[in-house]
Amino acid sequence: MSDSLWPDEPGVNPQVLVAAREALGWTQGQLADRLSELSGARPKISQGYVSRVEKGVLSAQADRAELFAAALGCTVDLLVSEAKLWSLGDGCLYHRNRTSTKSSTLRRLHAQVNLVRLALHRLAAAVGVELPVFDMTPMPVGGLYGPSDAARAVRESLGLGKGAVESVTGVAERLGVLVVPMSLGGREVDATSLHPPGEAPIFVVNTDAPTDRQRFTLAHELGHLVCAPEVDLDVEEMAQAFAAELLAPAREVRVDLAAAPITPARLLQLKSVWRVSAAALLRRAVDLAVVTDSRYRTVSAQMSALGWRSTEPDPLPRERTRVVPALLASSVADLGGPRAAAGVAGAPLEVLRGAFGVGLVDGEPSEGSGT
């Protein structure tokens, strides 16, 4: 099988090709093997060939574009599209991950969130649904104002009142965020978010984490979105401070924390009130000078001995997304069924199933957006 070189045939977009491969966790060699298997090519298609296509040195058109699409489980239309993809270097993609997270894991999630973004935009365009608009001007932080000020401004602008935030997912969606809950295959990464200029931000949140972790993660990602940090500010610490104040405002939570001695049992009581983890409340207690560093370490050790670092008691109920499931329902209804909608979305089926549940692709009740 030879490369098509017809000038009127659109070639594969190298960026989209790389994203489609990395979203599946494949190496170039694995893709080459799959291409060889499907085509029956002898000699086999090499990793070097895949590399040259991904770099744009070779153009994959016509039959080769169809072969790549078949191998990756996506559509030719997606592969040849002139879609813009985003990377960490663009300053609008964030991960909340552990320091030990492998770079390959981050590349896969980076690719997945880009393809989820493309899928949602393609579906919205096909059914005439307008995606949310994020029109909040980010607040400068690091000088006169800090991230806690930004959190208080968000609470005031949305009329959240006092006490716990009922639904952090709801807060994000009210601000114009597309929230996509999906399993990320473990706990290495809590979330990936993408903030393309002029578009609705997308938060992919790990459903493998408990609800209290998901809520804090969403608040953390909102911190990146609504704060405009000064150059020398640590953006992760900024987002952490924003999340802490959004979920448990200092003036209110300090009163509860100081009302009785801080013990694991007391923290569990407050967990049900504030809907944040006992560990986060303990951190809040020391940050607000309710307990000393020594007492913090003592209670932290007690919680660790109880096994709470891996799983805390009294899990919080799951939150539910609304915007993305509504778009998917409209797409399935208007386009003629789940498979037709999946075809318009164009992304690899495995990625779509992971992001949206089996309902979009296989016609079964969707689970992916029901947190």
Image (cartoon, rainbow, N blue to C red):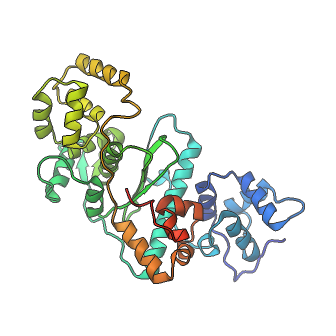
- Can residue 285 be seen from the camera position used here? yes
Residue occupying image coordinates x 16% and y 42%:
249
Quadrant, the C terminus? bottom left
Instruction: Find residue 221 and report its horizontal and vertical position in percent.
Output: 34, 50
Q: Is residue 67 rendered to the left or right of residue 84?
A: right
Front-most of residues 140 and 256: 256
For the point 54% across and 72% down, the residue is 342
Vertical side of 192 occupied by 117: above or below: below
User: Which quadrant would the N terminus be assigned to in this image?
Assistant: bottom right
Question: Which residue in the rendered view is the most extreme toward the right?
Answer: 42
As displayed, is residue 176 above or below residue 267?
A: below
Above or below for 268 versus 141: above
Instruction: Tell me what residue is drawn at x 20 percent, y 34 percent.
Output: 269
The number of discs equals 0
- Name the side, left or right, on which 123 lies relative to 71: left
x, y percent for residue 64: 75, 71
Query: Residue 137 lies in what quarter of the image?
Result: bottom left
Q: Quadrant of residue 296?
A: top left
Image coords of residue 344 (percent x, y): 54, 76
From this viewpoint, is residue 199 visible? no
List x then y, in percent, for residue 163.
14, 46
Q: In this view, does 119 lie to the left or right of 177?
A: right
